[in-house]
Amino acid sequence: MSERVAVRKTYKLFIGGKFPRSESGRSYLVQDSNVSLASRKDARDAVVAARAAVKGWAGATAYNRGQILYRVAEMLEGRRDQFVALGASVDEVDAAIDRWVWYAGWADKLPQVYGGANPVAGPYFNLSAPEPTGVVAVVAPESPALLGLVSVIAPAIVTGNTVVVAASPSAPLAAVTLAEVLATSDLPGGVVNILTGRLSETVPTLAAHMDVNAIDLTGVADADLAAELEVKAAENLKRVLRPAPADHDWSADPGLARMTTLLETKTVWHPKGV
């Protein structure tokens, strides 16, 4: 009998809950694997998928979103060894799992902390409540590839936003493998979309896209590029999260800032009965 030849995996994009190859047909060799090289067209397709998912995801109950994030943690727990084999340390994988659980717990609590009743001079109820911004473009940090990625995706989606993520160009396997976890964890298609390849090709398209409501520049290490992207983002008044400092500790308590920055506050007046 001839020796069996193993099937060599080609890592694809994650758009709309599916795993397409780049529309350009390109790929690049990184981490000893063939990975799809996303184009500007792929970035635009990802925004379309993210926009289509906003209504259903933002309209889901906070409790349901928390359940789904917890399910992601469960699925990731079952694939710990796979992520370790891809180069993540055991501590990083465990921290990434715990971070999904942490954000899942905030799903139905953040509105109580960040919203509330306001005192007004008159016979009215005045209530403020947080709502998702919409479609968020995210540049994932180069390192740590898994924990950094989870730390920018989870706070964006737990509150009802959808995201298009530009994964680490030098270590994309954690991102695409996380996409496989997301695809089997009840997360609706289009809530998270992941692009691999050159940041210089996809991120300017996302920054300038008129249907993107906010952009997280965490993974942009080049100050000049970050400034250029901020200018593009200003075209439709996107919210902008600045790049993270090089010494940022991703294992530290993440706090609420990432969640609250990607929220809008709706205030409603209602007359009181007499």
Image (cartoon, grey):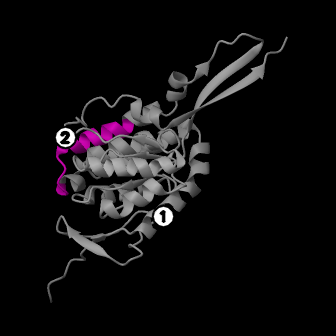
Residue holding disc 2: 91
* Rendered position, 130 above or below 1: above
Q: Nearer the N terminus, badge 2 or badge 1? A: 1
Most distant residue in the right direction:
274
Residue 5 picture location, percent across and down? 19, 81
| Label 1 element class | helix
Q: Residue at x 34, y 54 (%)?
A: 178
Q: Residue at x 39, y 54 (%)?
A: 165
- On the picture, is 115 further left or further right than 120? left
| Label 2 element class | helix
Name the kind of residue labelled 2 in the image: Asp
Indicate yes or no whether the magenta region holds residue 92.
Answer: yes
Residue holding disc 1: 44
Disc 2 + disc 1, Cβ < 8 Å: no
Callout 1: 10 Å neighbours few (<14), some, many (20+)? Answer: some
Q: Nearer the viewer, residue 167 or 34?
A: 167
Q: Nearer the viewer, residue 207 or 27?
A: 207
- On the picture, is 97 further left or further right than 124? left
Q: Which residues are magenta?
A: 85-101
Q: In what quadrant of the picture does the N terminus appear?
A: bottom left
Q: Nearer the viewer, residue 198 or 114?
A: 198
* Rendered position, 231 above or below 113: below
Name the kind of residue labelled 1 in the image: Arg
CA gap, disc 2 and disc 1: 35 Å
Q: Residue at x 43, y 47 (%)?
A: 215
Residue 137 is at least partly visible in this image: no
Indicate yes or no whether the magenta region holds residue 235.
Answer: no
Residue 185 picture location, percent across and down? 44, 52
How many numbered callouts? 2
Residue 238 is at least partly visible in this image: yes
